[in-house]
Image: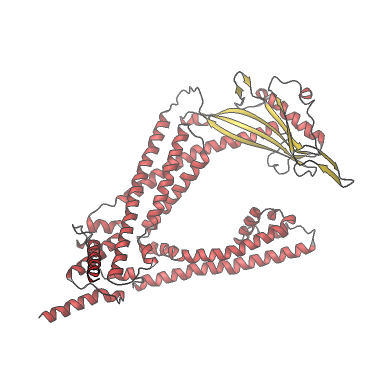
Amino acid sequence: MNLLQEEIDMEESSDLYDVYGTSGPLPRSEEDLDNVECLRRKIKYFFMNPCEKYHARGRKPWKLILQIIKIAIITIQLVSFGLSNQMVVTFKEENLMTFKHLFLKNYVDGVKDTYAVYRQDDVYDHIDYIIEQYGRLHNITVGNHEYQKDGAFYTPLSLCQEFYRNGNIYPGNETLDIDAQVKTECLKVYPMYHPSLQQALSHFELHFKRMLSVKITFVLKAINLQTVRHRELPDCYDFTVTIIFNNQVHSGRIKVDLENDVDINECRELKVTGASARNIYLTVLFDCLIIITCIASFTLCTRSVISGIQLQFEYTLYCRVYCSKMVSMSDKLEFVNGWYILIIISDTLTIIGSILKITIQTKVSTNYDVCSIFLGTGTMFVWIGVLRYMGFFRKYNILILTLRAAFPNVIRFICCAGIIYLSYCFCGWIVLGPYHEKFRTLNTVSECLFSLVNGDDMFPTFENMKQKSSLVWIFSRVYLYTFVSLFIYMILSLFITIITDTYDTIKQQQESGLPTSELQKFLSVCKDLPNSGVYRLHKNNRCFFNCCISRCRSRRERLTSEA
């Protein structure tokens, strides 16, 4: 009878572990079998979806509920901030266009690259025009622009000329004697208090042959009244306007450009009927709610990541003690949930962005760009995290599994293709740059070639090639035809093949239903359903871990005593 019972136990043990194909010692005692089953159920529970976990242990899916709430409130926050930021951007852009029409003589929209002067008299006329318009600002502007004040006086306009300190240039004799050190001369002109233009510039001479640039800088103030319509308090703006006459090329063409640097400040005294700070306080309170929600989400996801690492440690310990083998890296990574890590990153970015948004609302900071990057990236990751819950459906899950399985091969493929791409970038820049506008800089070369890969802007790229050099023109044809043929017909086709092959492999694995990894084989033995009740927590929920620790300790003591 005892022999028959031993045979039955051996058959049960072989049924449990033949599926792994292990050759090491297997647990034979009833306690060991219970411990292994405990570990298997813990791991299987870890990989369940929220609904299955609810049926298994009755725990409510707090992370799922929290993510749904977080997506809704973060999207509302982003839309609100985007509308506010849109008003700021519109005010900046329209003021920049206003300043160009006010201070650039005969300026026409859309002539940024062609707005230049070619004669000495034109340079003086343009400078005179700027100074005159600056002095008559109150009489000509239709906006609420005002000069900046330093105490009781207006801040002056600054006119600075940069030129080589000394130099004798004689192109006819092909001789040159020049000092490379740059000298700067400045003149200040006060608005409404300056003398006539001729008197102000009588002692200011432009050294055209040695001149590098002329910079005219002044500060104007304005108030953005758009927010008044939304029952919000307006902001005060400081516009630092810089007009540059660029002569660094010394080609006889001096480019003229106007730049605008903006500082946003809280207005000192505000009295707006119908508007109050209540909306700001409500917005700040809403941002604080988002921060609290993200902290809760961050805590829950971090706890899940730590639980996965602990289970990975227990499974690795089981394989080393009972199966005498190491766990593969792919199986170890199964315990590290990338979706949780993505949610943790999005929570961190959203918390930082919300804090920056609060500082902007309270006028402590005005860095809209940095806040936009944090909020925009955080919201993007939050919405991408929705794919985790889409993966619980079989038809959607195959797409996610395909992306995850193909990612390593795609990265390796991109590295190889990137080397070829960079080689074409460097070659096109150095050879075609002097003859084609799209190849003047490495940045424009990369953008042009990327457009060609996507089938965009092909004919203009071929057509705009200047035919001043027959050799370079022939080279450009060979260069462009080989690039288009190589990347569109070969590299892109191989890239698509990698994705389709991975998709077919994942689809076949799902249709067959056979486990493909050691971890899946280990879990496939457990046939218990989530609502079976065997997944309920007991006092010995860390039974296997404690058992392995005690087993290792007893083995160490036995070896010590034998020694």
Residue 168 image offset from top left, x and y in percent? 84, 40
Which residue reaches farthest front?
Answer: 563
Check the image and report above or below for 81 versus 470. above
Residue placed most toward the observer, 32 or 127: 32
Residue 42 image offset from top left, x and y in percent? 26, 61
**Position of the C terminus by quadrant:** bottom left
* x 38%, y 38%: residue: 288
Which residue reaches farthest top?
Answer: 152
Count of picture labels: 0
Q: Quadrant of residue 43?
A: bottom left
User: In the shown orientation, is residue 427 left or right of residue 366?
Assistant: right
Residue 9 image offset from top left, x and y in percent? 17, 76
Check the image and report above or below for 550 versus 6. above
Residue placed most toward the observer, 220 or 96: 220
Residue 529 appears in the rendering: no
Residue 315 image offset from top left, x and y in percent? 30, 65
Q: Quadrant of residue 357?
A: top left
Residue 503 appears in the rendering: yes
* x 47%, y 39%: residue: 81
User: In the shown orientation, is residue 548 left or right of residue 199?
Assistant: left
Q: Quadrant of residue 97?
A: top right
Check the image and report above or below for 110 versus 495. above
Which residue reaches farthest right?
Answer: 173
User: In the shown orientation, is residue 255 left or right of residue 150?
Assistant: right
**Position of the N terminus by quadrant:** bottom left
Residue placed most toward the observer, 178 or 72: 178
